[in-house]
Amino acid sequence: MEKAWQRKRPYSKRVSNDRHIRNRILILCEGGKTEPNYFRKFPVNIDLVEVNVDGAGANTISLVKDAIRIGQEAIERGHSYNQIWCVFDRDSFPAGNFNRAFNLAMRNRIRIAYSNQCFELWYFLHYHFSDAAIDRYSYTQ
């Protein structure tokens, strides 16, 4: 009779490059450089989260419509996103455009992050203390 310690155990090959992503997040940004560069440098645990960042360079409503389209395409490919975010400035867009974009996003389960005045001011304040009112054109130089 074969003893337990004498039995050959089946060994399976180690699977490499096989990650099980638990969360897929899409971040679409209004700006083409500052916002995407910021989010790409944000530390995430790549074993748990896959984050795709794209600087669309579009206005608020167009950005939300792009997010809806990209989300649908991902579902059709079988790689849906757990979260989709649109990031844009409040800017000087008419309030109606901003509100329509916000409502369209809510109806399609898209999350909104917006900065007022603009993202660059928020980014600037990460590195420079200021307690004065700064116009958006004053800190870009």
Image (cartoon, rainbow, N blue to C red):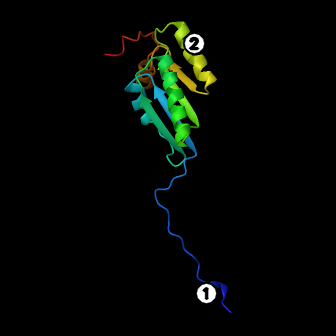
Residue at 39%, 26% in the rendered image: 34
Q: Position of residue 61 (x, y in %)?
A: 50, 17
Looking at the rendered image, the disc whose residue lies closer to the viewer, 2 or 1, is: 2
Number of callouts: 2
Q: Secondary structure at mark 1?
A: helix
Picture coordinates of residue 110, whole percent (x, y): 58, 27
Say few, some or many: other residues with alpha carbon within 10 Å of mark 2 (under 14 / 14 to 19 / 20 or more): few
Q: Which residue is mark 2?
A: 99
Q: Is residue 61 visible?
A: yes
Relative to 60, residue 33 above or below:
below
Report the quarter where the N terminus lies.
bottom right
Tag 1: amino acid: Gln
Residue 100 or residue 4, whichever sits in front: 100
Going by the picture, which residue comes out furthest to the left? 141
Residues at marks 2 and 1, CA–CA distance in whole angstroms? 72 Å
- Front-lying residue, 76 or 44: 76
**Residue underneath mark 1:** 6
Seen at 54% across and 23% down, the residue is 113
> How far across and down, in percent of the image, does residue 73 sit?
51, 35
Amino acid found under the numbered disc labelled 2: Asn
SS label for mark 2: helix
